[in-house]
Amino acid sequence: MSSSRVANSPKAPPCVSLQVACTMLSRLFSEVLPDVQRLAADWAEDNESEDCKAKDDEHDDDDLDEPLEGSSRAESEMAGDDDDDDDDDEAEEEECDDENGGDKPKKRGPKKRKMTAARVERSKVRRMKANARERTRMHDLNSALDNLRKVVPCYSKTQKLSKIETLRLAKNYILALGEILRNGKRPDVVTYVQMLCKGLSQPTTNLVAGCLQLNTRNFLTEPCSEGARFHMPTSPFSVHPYSYRCSRLSSPHYQPGSGAINMRSHSYGSGYEGAYPPGGTSPDYNSPDYEGQHSPPVCLNGGMSGRQQESSDTDRNYHYSMHYTGLTTSRPSHSIPFGPTGARSAGAHSENIPPFHDVHLHHDRAPPYEDLNAFFHN
DNA sequence: TAGGCCATCTGGTCCT
DNA sequence: AGGACCAGATGGCCTA
């Protein structure tokens, strides 16, 4: 089959490979985020003239300056030893195609060499080397995609976004951050979620929307005192399977209260409606941009198809564990849990988080956007 | 079992 | 010639 390759044609504009694009995106995020955080810090300062505030916000723009380390070269266990010495049989192959000399009319163009056993063997070797290179190339590409996953909202090492969803989300993330920077003003969270979820599949939409809105809801409703303490989750589902449970949300067999998340009660259901008027924006999952699979919609504006039911404590604990991990820091506020290594530090992710016992909420209103961003890196 | 996702192999194309 | 990149094919795994 002839592949319709046009990417690298001379007339086509120069384009980067997928792997390079992923790496560039990762770095781009790390460069854009500080600006957004700085902007968010300004917003936060404007907003918080009354209560608990203004402690330390100098530390939030230095954590991201270090570029994410590029996709570490895969160890290429199979390809690394390819440069061995297998080129010592050229000579005898060259003369084996002279046997048809004779008086036949010579054909133009490259001579068709006979496939001798040696040539077949060499072709095999070449193919194997090409396979090994292709394998490592794909490993590098996956590494780059993993890096991209880490700087994109809703990172989870255990339940990864698919490749296509990662790229879609990255695109939306860029657009959203760019929009924030361009407008210089704080969009409402619904719009933010809309931007992020545009074109994403339903499960991913649930994931992203849940990440943001559950936290927002808690921030909006939970008191910032002891009542907002966190505990390690006790639910058997609470270790990691956030995405799993989100996918459960879209399942027709989903039963609220059975250990799965009830998006409505947790997000827009109670607390959220108080903060955002019902006439506000709501994601349009039926928009033409949506290309993903369709599953029973999880409503972001309170009118969802799922049955409403108050959430269990395990669910709540679970949310805390999943969404406040980014705030699991000793710093009192405005802390983006990015590690000094440039890449998201281990503490930024749910797999490596310290215990939650000492985590507090510091806002009883809408969170500053650096915190919103922090949500995405749980 | 169907569908989604993924890894791998493979051949074609372009570039150095 | 060989490497990089790409897309199609294929089979495995997982989940609903």
Image (cartoon, coloured by chain):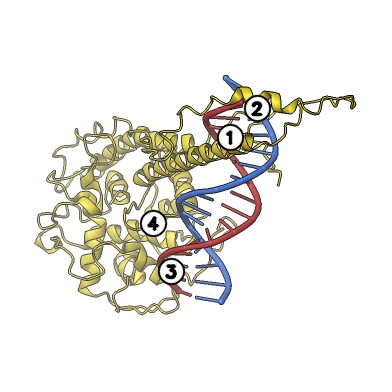
Chain colours: A yellow, B blue, C red
Which chain hosts label 1? A
Where is residue A255 shown, x and y percent of the image?
36, 80
Numbered disc 4: secondary structure: helix
Q: Count all numbered tags in the image, as a single digit.
A: 4
Where is residue A267 shown, x and y percent of the image?
33, 65
Label ID, residue A122: 1
| Distance from the alpha carbon under mark 1 to that under mark 3 | 57 Å
Circles 4 and 2 in contact, beta carbons < 8 Å: no
| Distance from the alpha carbon under mark 2 to that under mark 1 | 10 Å
Where is residue A17 shown, x and y percent of the image?
53, 35
- Which residue is located at x 25 percent, y 63 percent? A319
**Kind of residue at badge 4:** Val
Q: Is residue A369 left or right of residue A184?
A: left
Which chain hosts label 3? A
The residue that label 4 is drawn on is A208
**Kind of residue at badge 1:** Arg
The residue that label 3 is drawn on is A298
Choose between A185 and A150: the one closer to the eye.
A150
**Kind of residue at badge 2:** Glu
| Distance from the alpha carbon under mark 3 to that under mark 4 | 12 Å
Label ID, residue A93: 2
